[in-house]
Image (cartoon, rainbow, N blue to C red):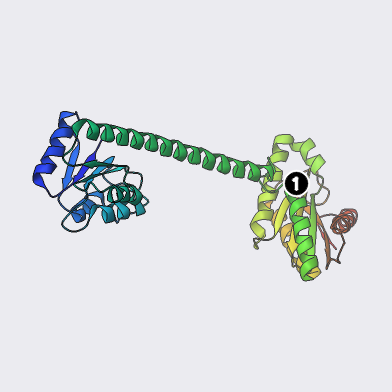
Amino acid sequence: MNILIVDDTREQDHGIQNILASAGYDSLFTADTVKDAFELMDINSEKANAIGMDLIVLADKLPDMDGICACRIIKECSHLQDIPIIIVTNNHNIDDLQSFITAGALYYSEKPLKVLEFLVHVQSALKIKQETDKRKQREEELLEVTRQLEEANRNLQKLSFLDGLTGIANRRRFDEVLLNEWQRAVRENLPISLIILDIDYFKNFNDSYGHLMGDECLKQVAQSFSARLKRPADLVARFGGEEFAVVLPNTSRKGAVAIAEILRRGVEDLQIPHISSTVNCYVTVSAGVSSTIPARYSHPDKLVLCADEALYQAKHTGRNRVMC
């Protein structure tokens, strides 16, 4: 345990050192002035107790500052305030002695020192410091555990919003974002658009290439969609099976159709072979677009229904196309 003795009286200083050394305390530091003590403790540092002092034995009268002022300054430093202080004094006035405790000292010992009483104070102060350090360590450990739990919960929440296969947003996330963006569009009188895309003849693809290749196809299509959506507010989600949905806040019908066409061409450009398609020798998608400026008290279900109807038209008029 590190003990700092601050006293410019050499005889007294050596006396305190001798008492502490005889009692088995061997990690002792000395300072003649408060300035030296502050430098030793790195009082201006934001770091916690740089040299790890566990106790300060402080004289009440020093060349550059009295002990009460020094005690108050130490207790005002967040990284030093847990260090117990014992004031050593020649003053026997009870009011003055009480002022040491008010300033933040744990104990005071009157000169000439009563060795047994002084050592009891030292032992008690060091025990309090040990218990304080243990408590703070437990608090830090608890804070770290809490931080890790919060991070784990955030990660779990993120995972709960992701489709396990494709890594893009899942249907739950889609429903949440669509509702939020719909409500914002109502408040701000803005357009909102939705695209629903379906991989053409995907069942035939699975029958021809197997479900593992089908899963790989879904991943590549999802990545293609994600790569072509440039705005952070736009959301692509796996809508279900081989269907995907794209929420486009503050986007007009014309803009949504243009984006749907970009997404359609992007899948075509992947050139994923599809021998069972009657539309193309590669995997293609059909897209349905709906767009509106929602009225107050309306619900986004109508937007989904309209996009689904447009997708139905795209599939029944030749596939690999965008309908609005």
Which of the two residues, 296 or 282, is positioned nearer the viewer here? 296
Q: In which quarter of the image is residue 131?
A: top left
Q: In this image, 299 relative to 51: left or right? A: right
Q: In this image, 259 relative to 109: left or right? A: right
Residue 129 vs 186, above or below: the answer is above
Residue at screen point 18% across, 59% down: 64
Residue 150 vs 195, above or below: the answer is above
Count the marks: how many? 1
Residue 77 seen anywhere in this rendered image of the structure: no
Which of the two residues, 209 or 112, is positioned nearer the viewer here? 112
Residue 178 vs 240, above or below: the answer is below
Residue at screen point 69% across, 46% down: 161
The x, y position of residue 177, in whole percent, is 74, 55
User: Which residue in the rendered view is the most extreme toward the left?
Assistant: 11
Residue 95 vs 130, above or below: the answer is below
Residue at screen point 77% across, 56% down: 178
The x, y position of residue 133, in whole percent, is 37, 37
Read off the residue under disc 1.
172
The x, y position of residue 281, in whole percent, is 76, 49
Q: Quadrant of residue 151?
A: top right
Check disc 1: other Cα within 10 Å, few if <14, some if 14-19, many if 20+.
Answer: some
Q: In which quarter of the image is the C terminus?
A: bottom right
The x, y position of residue 60, in whole percent, is 22, 50
Q: Quadrant of residue 16?
A: top left
Q: Quadrant of the N terminus?
A: top left
Which of the two residues, 300 or 68, is positioned nearer the viewer here? 68
